[in-house]
Amino acid sequence: MASDTTGNLASNGSAAGALVAVGVGVFTFGLLVILAHANGSVAALLNWYPPAGPLSGKTGAAIVVWLVAWVVLTRRWRQTNVDLGRAWRVTLALLVLGFLGTFPPVFELFG
C-alpha cells in the first residue's frame, strides 16, 4: 500500500469510483439501446441530432451518466479503502451487460 506524506495509508476509493463509473456508463448505453429499440417514443426522445438519429441521445446520455457517476462515486469514496476486487467484478458485470445490450440478437428480443 502506498502512503501519503504523513505516513497514513492512501485510500483507493477514487480509483474504485472511476472504475465502477465506467461500468455504469457502458451499462447505461446498452440499456438505452434496448429501450430505444423497444419503444418508439424513447427513440424519438433520444433523437438529439436528426442526421444521427437516436444514437446521438444514447451516446450523449451515457456520457452524462458516466460523468455524474464518476463525480459522485469518487467524492463518496475518496477517503475510504474500497475492495478493488469487488469493484472490478461489479465493473466487469456492468460492462458485459452493457455490451450485450448493443448486439442485435439481444436488443431485438425486446422490440
Image: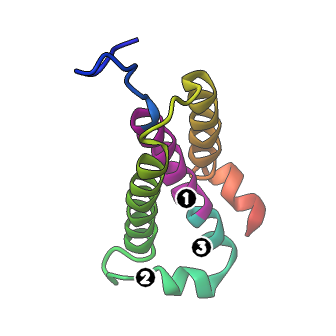
Mark 1 neighbour density, 10 Å: few (under 14) some (14–19) many (20 or more) = many
Q: How far apart are marks 3 and 1 (CA)?
A: 12 Å
- Give the quadrant of the C terminus: bottom right
Whole-percent x and y of residue 71? 39, 55
Closer to the camera in the image, 73 or 62: 73
Which residue is located at x 52 percent, y 44 percent? 23
- Please state which amino acid type lies under the numbered disc 2: Asn
Mark linked to residue 93: none
Point out the tag, 2 or 3, that comes first from the N-terminus: 3
Point out the tag, 1 or 2, that comes first from the N-terminus: 1
Mark linked to residue 47: 2
Q: Give the range drawn in magenta.
A: 14-31
Q: Is 29 covered by the magenta stretch? A: yes
- Please state which amino acid type lies under the numbered disc 3: Ala
Which residue is located at x 55 percent, y 30 percent? 82
SS at mark 3 in the image: helix
Q: Do the residues labelled 3 and 1 touch (CB within 8 Å)?
A: no
Which residue, given by chain and number where applicable, does mark 3 sit on?
36
Closer to the camera in the image, 17 or 43: 17
- Please state which amino acid type lies under the numbered disc 1: Thr
In the visual, does 2 lie left or right of 109? left
SS at mark 2 in the image: loop
Which circle, 1 or 2, is nearer the viewer?
A: 1
Which residue, given by chain and number where applicable, does mark 1 sit on?
28
Q: Which residue lies furthest to the front in this view?
A: 6
Which residue is located at x 67 percent, y 58 percent? 107
- Give the quadrant of the N terminus: top left
Point out the tag, 3 or 1, that comes first from the N-terminus: 1
